[in-house]
Image (cartoon, helix red, strand yellow):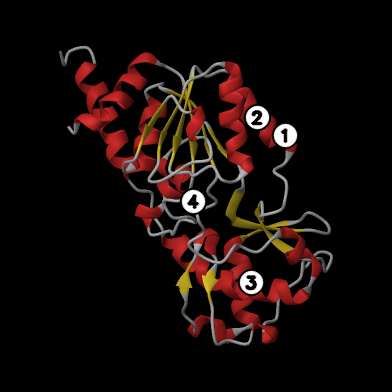
């Protein structure tokens, strides 16, 4: 076991109820790209903002054409060792709660139950008019029926199920409307520029207050929706550790930081906990 993980092992030894916040870095091993490089700069063009999506039909054509392709990667992605390790740490009672900024549903598929998907999940779609909800698979089928040519396109996948679709005239895309009211359909995720529902944020704050420490995994915390929980942990006097390849917005607030692979770090923690379990001394 590399000695670099000893401080994180000690962190888990000293705290019994840890609040975890995860970001895009925990899903890269599942084939889903992350947003930023080690310096915190965008790796891709910035995702579509909520105001643009709701403002014009052209923006929704662009979004759904690219998302149709990107969803294929998301649909087939499988939980990796980080997701599995967090689910196991929850089962043995070491985690107070897990909050993920990701919309890929991989924590849930790995078995995490005390979980808040802060930005929602791509696996369902809602109507902005009447609030009707349909499975994403249904929306995918409706898009393909209306636009058969989309099934033959390929593109480099981006975070959040987006894709770099070049050389295709997106103004030809026919975007399905809500069958119930004719309203605009949107994935049930929080877009950039959109607020996280207040009740969901309070749920996370309540879980944080029940914890005795906080751990950040695979997030630069450049987006305020996640950074706020580190600020609150600091205000509450809770120590915060982070495992992330690169800078974070909260570096000055961290009690411990490891530039390391999340799966390797948690694997070392689980190995140490197993060795310390009764009967293994």
Residue with the mark numbered 2: 203
Sequence-earlier tag: 1 or 4: 4
Question: What residue appears at the point 45 percent right and 51 percent down from the top-left corner?
Answer: 39
Which circle marks residue 64 in the picture? 3
Question: What residue appears at the point 27 percent right and 40 percent down from the top-left corner?
Answer: 264
- In the structure shown, which secondary structural element does the residue marked by tag 3 occupy? helix
Residue with the mark numbered 4: 40
**Of marks 3 and 4, the one in the foreground:** 4
Question: What residue appears at the point 36 percent right and 32 percent down from the top-left corner?
Answer: 88
- Marks 1 and 4 close (CB-CB < 8 Å): no
Cα distance in 3D space between marks 3 and 1: 28 Å
Sequence-earlier tag: 3 or 4: 4
Question: In the image shown, does 205 or 43 lie closer to the viewer?
Answer: 43
- Marks 1 and 2 close (CB-CB < 8 Å): yes
Q: Badge 2: few (under 14), some or many (20 or more) residues near its Cα, within 10 Å?
A: few
Cα distance in 3D space between marks 1 and 2: 6 Å
Is the residue 166 above or below the residue 179 in the image? Answer: below
Q: Badge 3: few (under 14), some or many (20 or more) residues near its Cα, within 10 Å?
A: many
- In the structure shown, which secondary structural element does the residue marked by tag 4 occupy? loop
């Amino acid at each position: 076991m590399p000695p670099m993980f000893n401080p994180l092992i000690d962190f888990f030894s000293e705290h019994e109820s840890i609040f975890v916040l995860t970001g895009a870095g925990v899903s890269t091993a599942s084939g889903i790209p992350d947003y930023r490089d080690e310096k915190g700069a965008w790796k891709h063009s910035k995702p579509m903002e909520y105001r643009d999506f709701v403002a014009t039909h052209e923006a929704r054509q662009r979004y759904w054409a690219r998302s149709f392709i990107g969803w294929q990667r998301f649909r087939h992605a499988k939980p990796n060792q980080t997701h599995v390790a967090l689910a196991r740490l929850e089962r043995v009672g070491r985690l107070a709660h897990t909050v993920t900024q990701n919309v890929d549903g991989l924590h849930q598929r790995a078995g995490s139950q005390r979980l808040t998907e802060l930005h929602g999940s791509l696996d369902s779609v809602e109507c902005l008019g009447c609030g009707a909800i349909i499975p994403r698979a249904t929306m995918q089928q409706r898009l393909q029926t209306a636009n058969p040519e989309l099934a033959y396109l390929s593109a480099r996948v981006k975070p959040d199920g987006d894709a770099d679709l070049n050389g295709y005239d997106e103004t030809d895309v026919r975007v399905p409307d809500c069958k119930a009211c004719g309203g605009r359909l949107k994935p049930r995720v929080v877009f950039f520029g959109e607020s996280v529902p207040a009740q969901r944020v309070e749920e996370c704050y309540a879980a944080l207050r029940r914890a005795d420490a906080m751990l950040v995994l695979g997030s630069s915390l450049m987006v305020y929706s996640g950074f706020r929980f580190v600020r609150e942990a600091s205000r509450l006097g809770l120590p915060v550790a982070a495992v992330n390849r690169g800078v974070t917005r909260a570096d000055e607030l961290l009690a411990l930081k490891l530039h390391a692979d999340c799966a390797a770090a948690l694997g070392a923690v689980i190995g140490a906990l197993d060795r310390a379990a009764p009967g293994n001394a």
